[in-house]
Amino acid sequence: MQNVGIVGFRGYSGAELERILSRHGGVKVFLMEHRADADDRPRPRGVSGPPRIPCTAGAVREHSLAAVFLATPPEVSMELTPGFLESGAKVIDLSGAYRLRTVENYKRWYKADHTQPELLAEAAYGLPEFYRERIRCARLVSNPGCYPTAANLAIGPLVEAGVVNRRAGVICDAKSGTSGAGRKPSLKTSYCEVTENFSAYSLLDHRHVPEVLLNSGLEESQFSFVAHLLPVDRGILETVYFRTENLHSAADLLAIYERRYANEPFIRLYDPGKMPDLRAVQRTNFCDIGVRVDASSGRAVVVSVIDNLVKGAAGQAVQNMNLTLGFPETEALL
C-alpha cells in the first residue's frame, strides 16, 4: 500500500481522481488542503472521505506520499511542484504547466511566464500510448490536455504511417462538455448560456493546439483546430478530416490503428463506417475510434471519443501513476 495525495480535490478532475482511486487496491488517498476556505461538496452523514493533510512539502514527508496529483491551475502547479519533488514524491500534474517543453512556447500559448524552466524541460508527457517507457522512469509527469489526448491518439498513427496528405492539411472539429472548463463559475458555462445552445471558442489560438503539434508530427500550417462547447456535462468527440495518400479503403485505414494499438488496453476500434459516440465512453478510460474513407476522392474521416474527466484528465493521471509506481497499468480503470 502506497500513500498518494490530491491537491485540488474540490474541482471536477480532483473529485474524479478521488472516485477512481477509492477503488484502487494499492493506494491510500490523502486530500491536501490548498484552499481551506473553499466549500466542500455535501457528504451523507457518517461519510467523511479520505483524511485531510496540509498542502506542504513537510506533509509529503510526514505521510510518506509516493505521489501527488496536482489538479490545479498552472501557476499553482509551478509553485508546488519543486517542493514536492524535493520531498521525494512523484508529481502527476493535470494542468498545462509542464506540457510544452520550452518557455517560449509556454509564453506564446498561455500568455504567461514560466517560473520553472528546468522542470518544464524534464517533465514526461503523460500519454502512455506514446511515451510509456519514459513515464515509467519519470518523477514529474505532465498529464495531457483532454482535447490533445483524443486528437493525438487519432492523428499520430496516421502521420507515422505516412498516409496524410500534408499539403491538404488536417482539420480537427472538436466538441466538449462543460466540465472541461472547470468548476469555477463563469457566464459562458452557466446553465442558461449552455442549455439549448452550441458555440465555438478560442478559434485559431486554443492553448491545446501546440500539444497536438508536438506529439502528432504535424506542423502548425498543416493543422486547423476549432473547439466547441456542447450542452452536456462531460465527454469529448473530435471529428478529424484529412486527404489520404497511399490509402485505398477504410479497412486499410483501420489496419493502421490495429497495428499501432494492438496491445493497448484503453483503445477500442470500430468496424469501418461505424462511429463511437459520447455515451460509449462516459465514465471510462477508453478512447474509441471510428473511420470512414472515400477512396474515389481521397477523403477520410476519423472520429475519436473520450470522457474529458477520465481519459482526458483523472483516469489518464491514474494510468500514469500506475506506471510510475509499478502497479498494473489498468488498476482501478477497468
Image: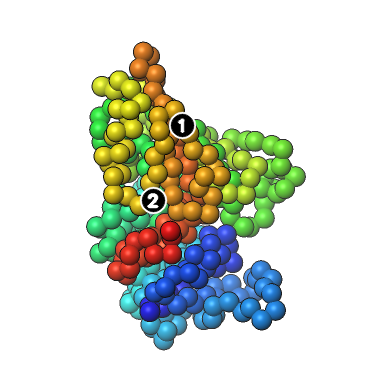
Q: Is residue 277 left or right of residue 189?
A: left
Q: Residue at x 45, y 53 (%)?
A: 285
In depth, the one of 278 and 217 nearer the eye is: 278
The reply to whether residue 329 is in sight is yes
**Residue 175 rendering spot, x and y as whole percentages:** 54, 39
> On the image, numbered disc 1 is attached to which residue?
274
Residue drawn at 40 percent across, 44 percent down: 268
Could you tell me residue 42's position as x and y percent? 69, 71
Q: Position of residue 227 (x, y in %)?
A: 53, 38
Of 285 and 185, nearer the camera is 285
Residue type, numbered disc 1 = Lys
Local crowd at mark 2 within 10 Å, few (<14), some, or many (≥20)? some
* Residue 94 horizontal side relative to residue 133, left or right: right
Checking the image for residue 53, the label placed there is none
Residue at the (49%, 77%) spot, across then down: 30
Q: Is residue 12 left or right of residue 133?
A: right
Q: Secondary structure at mark 1?
A: loop
Q: How many marks?
A: 2
Q: Residue at x 43, y 46 (%)?
A: 287
| Residue sticking out furthest to the top | 296
Is residue 36 depicted above or below 316 in this figure? below
Indicate the secondary structure of the residue bearing disc 2.
Answer: loop
Q: In the rendered structure, are the residues bearing label 1 and label 2 in contact, judged by CB atoms less than 8 Å apart?
A: no
Residue 217 to residue 323: above or below = above
**Label disc, if present, on residue 266 of the rendered structure:** 2
Q: Earlier in the sequence, mark 1 or mark 2?
A: 2
The amino acid beneath tag 2 is Phe
Q: Residue furthest front?
A: 271
Residue sitting farthest toward the bottom? 62
Front position among marks 1 and 2: 1
Query: Quick one: 46 or 238, which is closer to the camera?
Result: 46
Report, in whole angstroms, how far the alpha carbon at label 1 lies from the one at label 2: 18 Å
